[in-house]
Amino acid sequence: MVRKIYNALIALVIFLLAWANITEAQTSDRAYRIDTFSTSSSPEVYVTTSGGSVDIIGHSDDVVRIEMYVQRSGRYLDSSDTDLSDFDITIRKDGDVVVAEAKPRSSGLGIIRAVRNISVSFKAYVPEYSLAEGRTSGGSVSAERVYNDLKLITSGGSVSVKDIEGITELRTSGGSINLENVSGIISARTSGGSINARGIYGEAELRTSGGSIKLDEISAKISARTSGGGIRGKFFTFYDDIELTTSGGNIEIDLPETEHFTLNLRGQRVNTTLRNFSGEFERNRISGKIGEGGPVLSARTSGGSVSLKY
């Protein structure tokens, strides 16, 4: 009994410490440095780092607030115990352009002096109509509540966006891409992960070479392609063309009740119940139209089946 109580107390202590760390990490008092700039309602904001994350958050004030976080082995550092002599740090405002950048310095041999295992991350609070760009080569990038052009690029982490409007460009070579409630013209590409999209409006082009694609509550003209996984798509409306292509998995499509559209489905097997259909159909192919035809649903897979509900 005593041992059980002891184990329970240890587990409780571990939980409380973990929770304290999470809470601490989310507060700005852990920032190494904070800079605030008055701007217009739609400034340009560029945030770049090499070894950490970038988070861009829109708000209703005409102010850009840059919070810089420094970590070593997961522990937050401050200016009283750590200098950043191995980095070139730039945080400035020129006109209506705000730049925040952290670059490791190079030795005379051109080798990055990241010997202290330090990462520099940025959290940028920007006016919600800012033109914003975030880049990192070693961490994740994210943005929320930005209603203008947005570009997020990382070589080694995930990309996440939420509540975004405008022209959105997302790129990662080594992680997944997550989109929620995004409208406008959207381009998302990853070489090494999955794509999850929920609540997409407008026009979207999604590409991955190494993972699956999951679409939910989609109301957009969309082209989604993957070389290494399946595609699952649930569509809220169907008013413009849908193109789904994979070389390595199944395609599952759930359309709203639709009376008039055009079909072009191809796979090792095509599964659906055709109503009011005219055209050609075989075990592995369907080409024709429902009702009088309309927007085109195209789905093709080389390595699996295509299933359609409408």
Image (cartoon, rainbow, N blue to C red):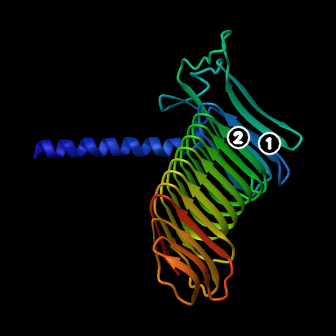
The residue positioned farthest toward the right in the image shown: 95
Evaluate whether residue 126 shows in this view: no
Please provide percent x and percent y for residue 29.
59, 39
Task: Give whichever of 301, 146 is nearer the camera.
Answer: 301
Evaluate whether residue 205 shows in this view: yes
Q: Is 181 left or right of 10, judged from the image as shown?
A: right
Please provide percent x and percent y for residue 36.
75, 41
Q: Which mark is residue 67?
A: none
Cα separation, mark 2 vs mark 1, equals 9 Å
Identify the residue shown where x is 45% and y is 41%: 21
Task: Give whichever of 83, 104 is nearer the camera.
Answer: 104
Identify the residue shown where x is 83% and y is 53%: 42
Query: Is 2 above or below relative to 246?
Result: above
* Mark 1 residue type: Phe
Q: Is 292 left or right of 190, judged from the image as shown?
A: right
Query: Is 35 above or below relative to 163?
Result: above
The residue positioned farthest toward the top in the image shown: 108
Asked which secondary structure carries label 1, the reply is strand
Q: Is 310 left or right of 132, judged from the image as shown?
A: left
Task: Give whichever of 62, 203 is nearer the camera.
Answer: 203
Identify the residue shown where x is 67% and y is 16%: 106
Asked which secondary structure carries label 2, the reply is strand
Identify the residue shown where x is 45% and y is 74%: 283
Query: Is 237 above or below relative to 123?
Result: below
The numbered mark, 2 or 1, whose residue comes first in the sequence reads: 1
Q: Which mark is residue 37?
A: 1
Q: What residue is pinned by disc 2?
A: 66
* Mark 2 residue type: Ile
Please provide percent x and percent y for residue 86.
64, 18
